[in-house]
Image: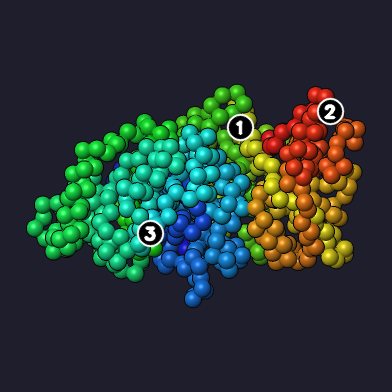
Amino acid sequence: MVFKVRLWEILWVNGGRNLPTDNKELIEKRRTFAIISHPDAGKTTLTEKLLLYTGTIQLAGSVKGKKTDKHAVSDWMEIEKQRGISVTSSVMQFNYDGYCVNIIDTPGHQDFSEDTYRTLMAADSAVMVIDASKGVEAQTRKLFKVCLLRDIPIFTFINKMDREAKSPYELLEDIEEVLGIHTCPMNWPIGCGRDFKGVYEFASKEILAFTANNGQREVDTDKLTLDDPELDDRLGDTLAQTLRDDVELLEGAGDELDLEQVRHGKLTPVFFGSALTNFGVEPFLADFLKMTTPPLPRNTVDGEVDPFDDKFSAFVFKIQANMNKAHRDRIAFMRICSGRYEKSMEVYHVQGDKKMRLSQPQQLMAQDREVIEEAYAGDIIGVFDPGIFSIGDTVCSPSKKVRFEGIPTFAPEHFAQVRLKDTMKRKQFVKGITQIAQEGAIQIFQNLGGGMEEVIVGVVGVLQFEVLEYRLKNEYNVDIILEHMSYELIRWIDNEGIDPKKLNLTSDTKRIQDLKGKHLLLFTSEWNITWALEHNKDLLLTDFSKN
């Protein structure tokens, strides 16, 4: 059973120590971060164990769900439970040791990387999970580059030390050479696989020797020092001596922790552990919350917004339909960038150019939610969306209007013609495919002057076609015919007022439009793009569109 940890519960648990008393302190205690990784590195398992350790949930779900009907709390879609993968970002909030933590579990699968990119726009830092047996993998490299573009701190958790792994030196070298970022180990693993005995913490100069407990809540931990007479008996002569040699070497030659370098993505603190067994999860969480930043300023078209500004502002970074099947609702996820939100307060919707009140503001635990009275800069809230919000929209205080920079829509790489099997269900089809497109999961295009009976769907990865077909069937009761197309590239026409029908193009180039009426071209190769630019003077093409 999932439950929320409320402020009075934290007061009771923590004895009221170090709890904030005003808005500034409340905002300073916010931590909002995303977890990124290559598929199957253990990202969702780590998310689950953070929730488990903090008491937010009582029983960890089985991420794969093959032998039981349990599943990860953050994987709330039926297709996620069945496939054992994350296909959409989920948001969870919990309180721990006086901090209010907003954690975003992102899809690891490369076919859903655009959802991860939008999610990172809402985060102030990122936790990069790496499989200890594989090191840095392809999707990790892509997501790391996005983090660099955002100039946000990156913390590394090297996972699965309970299995056979590469040497920790090799893993650190891999991060530095492949990603081009310096590393600073915060702890050091003692063995791996069946011989994984715990970690040495450099700051405290203590050894945390773990005792397995089947991964439920925090593990039993004994603290030892390098000169403790029990060390050799506890670790074994070989592991104990190896640890002493490693510590001596690293304390003399390793990079020092420089938080200024960390906060600009130049240096990553590295933690070793095992999310599955809970080894090292609690020390990581405690150190991470101390080192990472409070809410960061956000860019607007006119400059930065300070999170400590009294005036409320937020932007929409995600929209999700049908999180509650009983109500067929649609939730807009907003990152609060400054000030304080109060229930029923009047806000200004910049893109809609009108004042409004946000309906049913909620804080979320994956698909579970709780209506809130207030929220602060750094928090992520969900509001009921009757269809007026789009990704990238700004809401703010009417007395201080701002407009945050838009979130780019990138060019999809795979295309398919999609049409109804049963034309009597046109209304459900249009509603379903439009809502899924508004979430950013797919992009919809039409033939010039065409209707919605037959559309072209563009996606970043082919697995998104499967998700589209599944969701239309299960959420909207619509069956579709999906025919893959040979086009590989798409470009937006950036010229104002140009007539695409008058362009001189190759015969296999297709003219289309998006739902906002913007004109685009579909190409089968880079050669066709070059041909179009050479034969149409002043034609401007871009591979992304600002929302």
Along the line of sight, the residue nearer the viewer: 35 or 340:
35
| Residue of label 2 | 536
Answer few, some or many: residues within 10 Å of disc 2's Cα (few below 14, many 20 plus, some between 14 and 19).
few
Amino acid at pointer 1: Phe
- Dot in front, 2 or 1: 2
Q: CA distance from mark 3 to mark 2?
A: 55 Å
Tag 1, which secondary structure? loop
Q: Residue furthest front?
A: 527
Tag 2, which secondary structure? loop
Along the line of sight, the residue nearer the viewer: 108 or 193:
193
Tag 3, which secondary structure? loop
Residue 253 image position (x, y, % from top left): 24, 37
Q: Earlier in the sequence, mark 2 or mark 1?
A: 1
Answer few, some or many: residues within 10 Å of disc 1's Cα (few below 14, many 20 plus, some between 14 and 19).
many
Residue 258, quarter of picture: top left
Residue 268 image position (x, y, % from top left): 38, 40
With 444 as the anchor, is 291 left or right in this view?
Answer: left
| Residue of label 3 | 160
What residue do we see at 54% from left, 65% from top?
84
| Residue of label 1 | 404
